[in-house]
Amino acid sequence: MRYPWLRLAVFIIGALVPAYWLYLGGVGDLGPDPGKVLVDNLGQGALVFLLCSLAMTPLQKVSGWPGWIALRRQLGLWSFAYASMHLMAYLFFLLGLDVESLPTEVLERPYITVGAAAWLGLLALAATSTRWAMLKLGKRWKRLHKCIYPILLLALLHMLWVVRADAGRWALYATVGAVLLTARLPSVQRSLVGVGRQGSR
């Protein structure tokens, strides 16, 4: 495994952040509705890890350092982990573990429908993130994992519905997402590679 200490640092950060939020909730420092705050924080954490995973390829092209790519899958898996914790916190704190009402919530509330679609997309990518899946799926693996782009758009739309009162924060995430999606355009990728080569001289 390349860059084990860097991977360990990402793992520690990913694991400690929700534990810290739970601690704040336990001591009453998450406000009058700690469950709702925890749900929102976990959802935004999933989005942050998703954006970080998408940033790894442009950073590698600009810097020429392969360590960025070594972290890409790990960051993507943390995005799925946070999205799953977001879902479980929603079921526990907002639905009171009334799982039977979840299908109705998904069908009647568009923001939950969109969020569920994004989670299912992340589930498919996480389940096929292994080397075995890459070999088994062949060319289809790349096509499947390009679904990360519409998943990002779904996640941003879900967040927009949830935090309509805090449009500034959403605009920040949306701007970063737009930049990262633009960086995937072939012409922009060639420019990034050119910048990386000039910087390595």
Image (cartoon, rainbow, N blue to C red):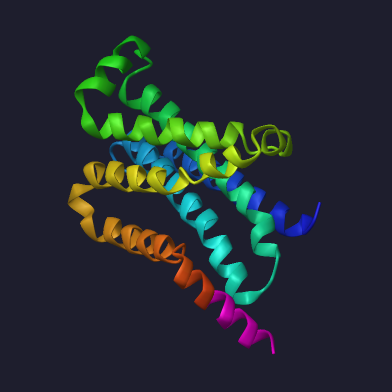
Depth check: give the residue in front, 115 or 20: 115
Question: Which residue sits furthest right?
Answer: 1
The residue sitting at 32% across, 58% down in the picture is 174
Question: Which residue sits furthest front?
Answer: 139
Depth check: give the residue in front, 101 or 155: 155
Q: Is residue 106 above or below residue 115?
A: above
Q: Position of residue 156 (x, y in %)?
A: 32, 48
Depth check: give the residue in front, 133 or 86: 133
Q: Is residue 116 above or below residue 102?
A: below
**The residue stretch that appears in magenta:** 192-201
Asked if residue 98 lies left or right of residue 55, the reply is left
Q: Please identify the quadrant where the C terminus is shown.
A: bottom right
The residue sitting at 62% across, 68% down in the picture is 60
Q: Is any atom of residue 85 visible in this view?
A: no
Q: Position of residue 165 (x, y in %)?
A: 18, 50
Q: Is any atom of residue 142 visible in this view?
A: yes
Asked if residue 163 lies left or right of residue 201, the reply is left
Q: Position of residue 182 (x, y in %)?
A: 40, 65
The residue sitting at 58% across, 75% down in the picture is 193
Q: Quadrant of residue 179?
A: bottom left
